[in-house]
Image (cartoon, helix red, strand yellow):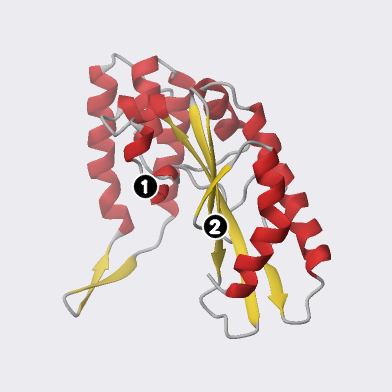
């Protein structure tokens, strides 16, 4: 983190977050209750240079019940801050809701720090309002579906199976199927070799996994895999 951003967080963000009960570790702010850990971390753009710092923030929710359902660590003292970003609601162009996405912000040697602070706090208040609305995991799953938020990993799916939240199970698997049906092939590099992966070839393996889960928990999907 640049000195510009570090000083900005110290003067414009830390006092607000501290007053709200958030603790700070490096560039992360976090707040823990009996159900969740809420996190906000500030991140600089990789294209910055001396005297110019473009930055944005990520926000996440870590659920103790979801972690337990997946056999993950639930002792907060053993978690790193990266573990706490179990669900990221924004990453530059990733929408926090269907109507709002987070901006990037700019600091320079001649920036109006007070104005930038006001803009960042306005965006943070949207996140904090959302955090305050969450009292249990069911509300979080309802929010995923209402805002059509796409969660890529299976952790919440496993939790939903165990809890019998079949509306979320159907929502998750249906969107997973749609994403692979619409995805194009993608290329990765392994040991210096470029390998083409066919997106359509991945879905049959996932479909098999979901069928097995449905059989295990005696659930009938409302659509065909």
Residue 19 sits in which quadrant?
Answer: top right
Secondary structure of residue under mark 2: loop
Q: Of circles 1 and 2, which is in front?
A: 1
In this orientation, which residue lies closer to the viewer: 206 or 23? 23
Name the residue beneath numbered marker 1.
80
Above or below, 138 against 58 in this view is above
Instruction: For label 1, count other residues whose C-alpha is less than 10 Å away and answer few (under 14), some (14-19) or many (20+).
Output: few
Q: How many marks?
A: 2
Mark 1 or mark 2: whose residue is earlier in sequence: 1
In this orientation, which residue lies closer to the viewer: 225 or 152? 152
Q: Name the mark on residue 91.
A: 2
Residue at image point 66% right, 52% down: 14
Secondary structure of residue under mark 1: loop
In this orientation, which residue lies closer to the viewer: 54 or 14? 14
Residue extending farthest bottom: 50
Instruction: For label 2, count other residues whose C-alpha is less than 10 Å away and answer few (under 14), some (14-19) or many (20+).
Output: some
Q: Is residue 98 visible?
A: no
Residue 162 sits in which quadrant?
Answer: top left
Q: Quadrant of the C terminus?
A: top left
Q: Name the mark on residue 175.
A: none
Going by the image, does 153 lie left or right of 114?
left
**Residue 107 location (% of width, % of height):** 70, 74
Above or below, 196 against 130 in this view is below
**Residue 49 location (% of width, % of height):** 57, 85
Residue at image point 69% right, 54% down: 13
Going by the image, does 145 lie left or right of 117?
left
Q: Is residue 185 visible?
A: yes
């Amino acid at each position: 983190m640049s000195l510009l951003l570090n000083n900005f967080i110290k003067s414009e963000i830390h006092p607000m977050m501290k007053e709200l009960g958030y603790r700070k570790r490096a560039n992360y702010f976090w707040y823990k209750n009996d159900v969740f850990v809420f996190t906000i971390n500030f991140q600089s753009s990789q294209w910055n240079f001396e005297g110019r710092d473009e930055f944005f923030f990520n926000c996440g929710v870590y659920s103790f019940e979801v972690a337990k359902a997946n056999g993950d660590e639930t002792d907060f003292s053993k978690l790193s801050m990266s573990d706490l970003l179990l669900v990221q609601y924004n990453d530059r162009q990733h929408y926090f809701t269907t109507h709002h996405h987070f901006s990037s912000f700019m600091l320079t040697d001649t920036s109006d720090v007070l104005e930038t602070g006001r803009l960042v706090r306005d965006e943070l208040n949207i996140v904090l309002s959302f955090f305050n609305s969450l009292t249990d995991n069911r509300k979080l799953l309802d929010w995923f579906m209402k805002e059509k938020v796409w969660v890529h990993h299976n952790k919440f799916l496993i939790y939903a199976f165990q809890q019998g939240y079949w509306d979320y199970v159907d929502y998750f698997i249906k969107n997973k199927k749609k994403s692979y049906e619409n995805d194009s092939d993608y290329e990765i590099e392994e040991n210096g070799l470029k390998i083409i992966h066919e997106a359509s070839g991945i879905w049959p393996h996932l479909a098999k996994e979901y069928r097995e889960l449905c059989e295990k928990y005696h659930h009938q999907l409302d659509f065909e895999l």
